[in-house]
Each structure stands twice: as structure tokens, then as C-alpha cells.
Image (cartoon, helix red, strand yellow):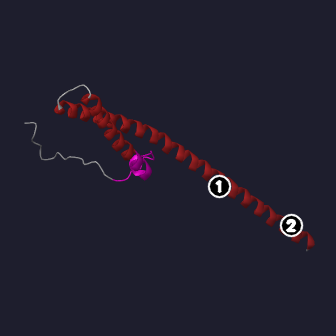
Amino acid sequence: MAGRRKKGDEDVEPTAGPDTSGGLRLTDHPRAQRQIATVKAWSGLAGFALGGLLAGRTGLPIADVLLRGLLAGIGTYLVAWALGVSVWRQLARAEVDHMRRMFEAAHAQAQAEADRLRAEREAKAQAKAKAA
């Protein structure tokens, strides 16, 4: 039977830990979550209202008007979700690239300062050695 398992079979549960693959996850980005949810909500409401308004102008019964408004709201909700995720993927990548460039610039500046201080220390040590 398909529903029965043998004694040695075990199901492997997927781990629900943080993403360690190094990839971007919009579910971990609070601004992205908030803004995508806001866009989805407003677009769903606007789609429902516009779909209902356009269907109501045709003289359909109220049940049909509400159904068409609901379908329009669901459609705009899904489109807004896809667009919001697409836009936020690009924004998150841009944020990561910007932070990486800032880190590299700060690292280069700190390295230059360390090299300058090391050169000053060596120059003082050479001057002290010549004086002695």
C-alpha cells in the first residue's frame, strides 16, 4: 500500500533555520516586507473597487458585480505582489552592493592610515638610530 511505511523508513524534515547559503531573502528585510504588504493591500482594494465599479455600470446583478470586483481585486493583488517582489529584489541587491562598496572604501582608508602611521614610526626609528 502507498500509505504504509516500512520499519526503517524515516521522513527527513527540512530545517527551519536561517538561510546560510549567503543569498538574499526578502523575508528577512523588514522594509521590503512592509512595503510589499502595503502595495498588495492597496492594489487589491483598488482592483476590487475598479472592477466592481466597471461591472456595476453594465447593469449586472449585484452578485455578479461583487464577483467581478473580487476577481479584479485578486488579479491586481497578484500582479502587485509579483511587481513588488521584483522591485525589492533589485533594491536589496543595490543596498548590498552599496554597503559592500562602503566597506571596501573604509577598509582601504583604514589600510592607508595604518601604512602612513607605520611609515612615520619607521622614519622616527631611523632618525633616532642616526642620532645615536
- Assign a secondary structure to mark 1: helix
Which residue lies at the image location 45% right of the left edge and 47% below the top edge?
22
- Near-viewer residue (113 or 122): 113
Which residue lies at the image location 25% right of the left edge and 28% below the top edge?
55
Please provide percent x and percent y for residue 38.
Answer: 38, 46
Q: Which mark is residue 70?
A: none
Residue 22 within the segment the image draws in magenta: yes
- Near-viewer residue (87 or 110): 87
- Near-viewer residue (70 or 17): 70
Which residue lies at the image location 9% right of the left edge and 42% below the top edge?
4
Q: Which span is picked out in magenta?
A: 17-35
Mark 2 belongs to which amino acid?
Answer: Gln
Mark 1 belongs to which amino acid?
Answer: His
Label pair 1/2, CB-CB below 8 angstroms: no
Quick one: label 2, few (<14), some, or many (20+) residues within 10 Å?
few
Which residue lies at the image location 79% right of the left edge and 66% below the top edge?
121
Q: Which residue is mark 2?
A: 126
Q: Is residue 31 above or below residue 67?
A: below
Q: Is residue 8 above or below residue 76?
A: below
Residue 19 at least partly seen? no
Looking at this rendering, what residue extends furthest in the left direction? 1
Looking at this rendering, what residue extends furthest in the top direction? 58
Q: Which mark is first along the chain, 2 or 1?
A: 1
Q: CA distance from mark 1 to mark 2?
A: 28 Å
Q: Quadrant of the C terminus?
A: bottom right
